[in-house]
Amino acid sequence: ETIFTELRNRDITFIAASGNQYAKLKSIFGDRDMYFISENGAVIYKGNELYNYKSFNRQVFQQVVDYLNMNQGIDQLVICGLKSAYILKHTSEAFKEDTRFYYHQLKEIDSLQQLPEDDYVKIAFNINRETHPNVDEEVATQFSNDIKLVSSGHDSIDIIMPNMTKGQALKRLLDKWEMSPSELMAFG
């Protein structure tokens, strides 16, 4: 708390940038007058208010989901929207428990082919190399113009929009504030 008070006294804006969901970041930092860059840069909040976001073309997003779920037979997908993250009801309790740790705003749905009305920003999944040894390469090739795959460690993959990064989100903020990168300090 002392650090946040000192930053505020010096008129310094604090920004947390992460691949995590906004609700997860809020659980870490609490109610603070700060910016949250979440979902690998797709979503920006100022405190509790949505400040800026970029989402997938809905049709393209559904094609990627269908490819992974129907063509590849992968059920353990985390479909990340602006309002919530979504997983299938019929997935294992272990998967649900793991997912709840990272996604504090989470809903279970019946089908990935009838996604709720939302603006979608990311697909997250773990690759089982025994059953799907090359699924990351295959989906990247299939949708090369529409998606980017980034590793979040240990065969965990985030499918995001091309040119959508935490750094790109910082640039959006700097442009809006008419500031140069030399006026920004980043850690992490």
Image: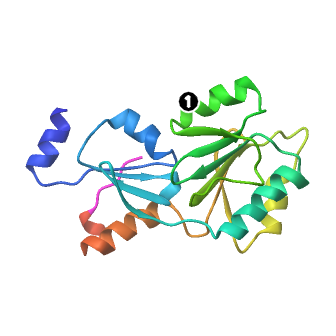
Q: Residue 15: percent from the left, percent from the top?
A: 32, 52
Q: Is residue 141 magenta?
A: no
Task: Tell me if residue 18 comes above or below residue 121 in the rendering.
Answer: above
Say if 39 sits above or below 25 in the image. Answer: below
The main secondary structure of the magenta stretch is loop
Amino acid under disc 1: Phe
Q: Secondary structure at mark 1?
A: helix
Residue at the image position 38 percent from the left and 69 percent from the top: 171
Q: Is residue 35 left or right of residue 88?
A: left
**Vertically, is 83 above or below 6?**
below
User: Would you name the residue on which mark 1 appears?
Assistant: 101
Residue under the point 32% across and 48% down: 48
Judged left or right of residue 87, residue 182 is: left
Q: Quadrant of residue 125?
A: top right
Q: Is residue 185 magenta?
A: yes
Screen quadrant of the N terminus: top left
Camera-side residue: 26 or 131? Answer: 26
Q: Is residue 70 left or right of residue 44?
A: right
Give the crowd class for mark 1: few <14, some 14-19, many >=20 residues within 10 Å.
few
Q: 69 and 112: which one is in front?
A: 112
Residue 128, position in %: x, y?
82, 39
Quadrant location of residue 12? bottom left
Q: Which residues are magenta?
A: 184-188
Q: Name the one closer to the observer, 15 or 95.
A: 95
In percent of width and height, residue 55 lies at 55, 65
- Residue drawn at the location 75% of the way across and 71% of the way down: 144
Is residue 156 visible from the viewing direction of this image?
no
- Residue occupying the point 38% across, 70% down: 172
